[in-house]
Image: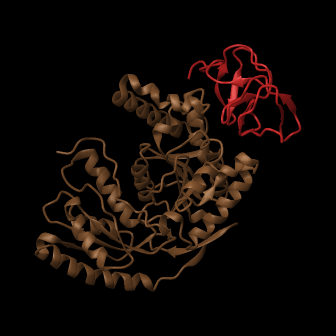
Amino acid sequence: MEPKVLVIDQKDNVAVALEDIAAGTEILLPDGRRFNAADAIPESHKVSLADISASDTVVKYGEAIGCAAGDIKVGEWVHTHNIKPTEGT
Amino acid sequence: MDTFSGYEREDGSVGVRNHVAIIPTVSCVNGVAGLIAREAPGAVPLIHGHGCGRAGRDLELNVRTLTNLGKHPNVGAVLVVGLGCEVIKAEHLASAIAESGKPVEYLEVQAEGGSLRTAAKGLEIFNGLLASVGREERTEVGMDRLILGLECGGSDAFSGITANPSVGVVADWLVEQGGTVIMTENTEMIGTSHILERRACSPEVAAEIKSMIYAAEQRTRDILGQYASLVIAPGNMDGGMSSIQEKSLGCIAKAGSSAIRQVIDYAGVPSEKGLVLMDAPGYDTESMAGLAASGAQVMLFTTGQGNPIGFPIVPVIKIASTSRLFRSMEDDMDIDAGVVLEGKSLADVADDIKSLLLRVLNGERSSAERNGQSGITCLYVTNPSF
């Protein structure tokens, strides 16, 4: 069984894990993209869909939810440890 | 274009239910309203805790809410029960409601000579009103005649992923059909002002959005002080929320992506169609009373922890964020949006919601209606009483 993730908006660069995903598991997106989870991703948490450079915007619901505190690689767990508030909000 | 069948009212609104409401002017006569309702099958008493001991802004809020609940399109006729010495007078409330063109009667306990005499006379009046609404029939109308209220209560980590975005698809569909969608709960918009302002149809509306959300944020700080940051709480973070924006985006996902046409005050009636924001708190029962007073004929209520509450005169459709909740509170839930977690698309869940919504508009009872989840009508006020 492929682990399930949900991409809420096409502009998003993170997806939501619909179940606990172990590090190293291959993730398949509905559009055919494949990558491996770099970390363990807890259920309802976010996984990066692309490399996000430090200070670049993290997008969910098609909107900025913060920006990368450092470089985030595809497949990494995205949470308070690597997101900081977007400037000016 | 989709249609639904409803009761066309003299003021141009369309009801999807045909209730006879009993509205106490003041909480002191709740018991009398209850006595009448007990003997009158089909009576819908709007039991509430207000009607006296207030002035200024709070009196205005009380009067507007009770008047607009009486004018609500799902109400075919109204019996106002007053006391006599209260601030909100039965005669005034009845005549304000009667502007809608529906039959309205009133009586007062002090003038009638006590609770039992009032209840007996009230029951007689009620039966007359019931007979008159019983003669009304449904006609088919377009979705542009619908006002949909949005509510979320007892959210969990999945609310913003499954239930709310599914409802957002339904909200966008209704706006496309020319209908009206009201989103409220200003505390759940904190952190997203810049996003909602961008969606405003004019700079004036953008300014109103900004001031509403700023005020909600200030109130939260005033009340919670150092704990204000807990609006993004450890529990939210455990659930994967990394910022207040992310949490609020999950809440406002209910409203889809349409432009925001108007900001209305609590219990105000929108003059615009499309997506409208109402300035009301996040407390479910108070925001639901505000949505009902705004004329919403139906509500979609998303829940993650499971909230059973409905509203006396408005069908409320419960959308569970997980299948776990749907199964554990099956009696109270209408739709299982948790199937998104098993791979069903948001669009498919939205289709299920739409189809149930249309059935409920046409008369099918929602779970909250079947279970008699009316509760008391919680009116929002801003200050202590005197």
Q: Residue at x 40, y 25 (%)?
A: B227
Question: Is residue B146 shown above or below A53?
Answer: below
Q: Vertical placement of B34 versus B56: above or below?
A: below
Is residue B142 among what the camera can see?
no
Question: Where residue B144 sits: x, y (%)?
Answer: 60, 63
Residue at figure coordinates x 38%, y 22% from the top left? B226
The quadrant of the rendering that contains the C terminus of chain B is: top left
Give the residue at x 64% y 55%: B336
Pinpoint residue B341: horizontal percent, then vertical percent.
71, 46
The color scheme shown is by chain
Note whether A4 is above or below A71 in the view shown: below
* Viewer-proximal residue among B304 and B10: B304
Q: Which residue appears at 34% of the width and 59% of the height?
A: B376
Q: Report which colour depicts chain B.
A: brown
Q: Quadrant of residue B104?
A: bottom left
- In x, y percent, where is residue B112? 13, 76
What x and y, as percent, mark residue B230?
Answer: 46, 28
Q: Which chain is red?
A: A
